Amino acid sequence: MRRLLLITLAVLLWAVPCLAQDKTYRISVTQIVEHPSLDAMRLGFLDRLAALGIKVEPLVHIAQGNMGTNVQIASQIQGENPDLILAITTPSAQAVAQKIKNKPIVFTGVTDPQGAGLVKLLGAPGGNITGMTDMSPMDRHLALIRECLPGLKRLGVLYNAGEPNSVVLVNLLKAECVKAGIVLEEATVANSAAVYQAAKSLVGRVDAVYVPVDNTVVSALESAIKVCEQNRLPFFSGDTDSVARGTVAALAVDYRKMGEQTADMAARILKDGKKPGDMPVESIKEPALHVNTAAAARMGLTLPQTVLERADKVLR
């Protein structure tokens, strides 16, 4: 009898970790809009969890750039009772952070988590939230544009003034332009349908155009590219995925890698029991340089050899 009890106990001790290992985690994903950079973060996140052997039931919600829908998604996620929430970009993170206080939230692609009111401190977020920032090195972005266009006097910037990420980045860009003696001309949009006309409004007023990591503009990027190609106006971007779509160059984080690193943070919460509020906000330290020589040529620009030689990826 005693031997039977010992065998039963041994079987139970073996089975419990196996059951835990086989657990499928429900993860609710909220994303403000679809475009390659944001999609890369989401796919990198899910693929990395799979590679770590973590089984996931993903419940993906896309707000299609609609702020009302974004808030509704937060309410819907609350009813899904997930094990963890992945929030991609600032508006999505803000919506779930305001609504949900009892589930771990991991954000990614957020430019200024502290300024957006998501965390108390980058090193000690507090509450039920942590994640990754994609703060762009605007001084290096402007330096790259000036290296490609040594005679740059006036720079246009396309963005949605309603996107917190974009406002932070444009303010940083303004400061860098003042230091460099460059005039910054702004063209703002409220939705993706306005991107074409906003880009046209910069023609004849600027020497080049720049778009930060702005979800509204990037979701309609081809319309701005068309204007720049027609008017031989070099167009630079704040994300590398846009270079593949036709901008001249970008110095930016690899968003798929950011998604993968975000998944590592989620794994520590799900598997190791870490508390989000105790986990410092992370970032990818060294951005990658991508250039598109064919796009540059269509916009009347020949990229300098110095830029081509240090590029991590050259599209021709």
Image (cartoon, rainbow, N blue to C red):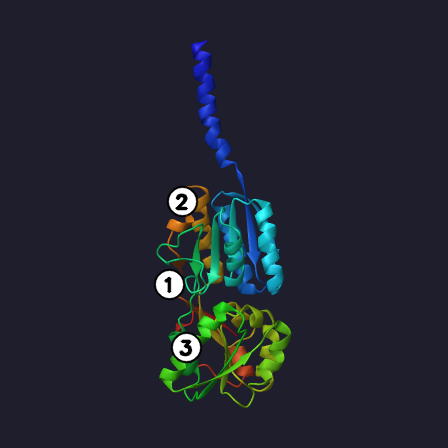
Q: Choose between 225 and 61: the one closer to the eye.
A: 61
Query: Which one is closest to the eye, mark 1 or mark 2?
Result: 2
Residue at x 47% of width, y 48% of height = 104
176 over 40 or under it: above or below? below
Res 294 quadrant in image = bottom right
Label 2 CA crowd tier, 10 Å (few <14, some 14–19, many 20+)? some
In this rendering, is residue 209 above or below 67? below
Q: Nearer the viewer, residue 101 or 208?
A: 101
Please identify, in this view, whether the residue under mark 2 or under mark 3 is nearer the observer.
Answer: 2
Q: Secondary structure at mark 1?
A: loop
Picture coordinates of residue 226 (x, y %)? 61, 80
Q: Is residue 283 visible?
A: yes
Q: Which residue is mark 3?
A: 307
Spot occupied by residue 234 in the image (x, y as percentages of width and height)? 51, 82
Q: Which mark is residue 169?
A: none
Q: Are marks 1 and 2 in contact (CB under 8 Å)?
A: no
**Crowd rating for badge 1 (residues with CA inside 10 Å; few <14, some 14–19, many 20+):** few
Residue at image mark 1: 285
Estimate the spatial distance between the alpha carbons at disc 1 and disc 2, rounded to whole Å: 23 Å
Tag of residue 274? 2
At 46% from the left edge and 49% from the top edge, which residue is drawn? 266
The earlier-in-sequence mark between 1 and 2 is 2
Mark 2 or mark 3: which comes first in sequence?
2
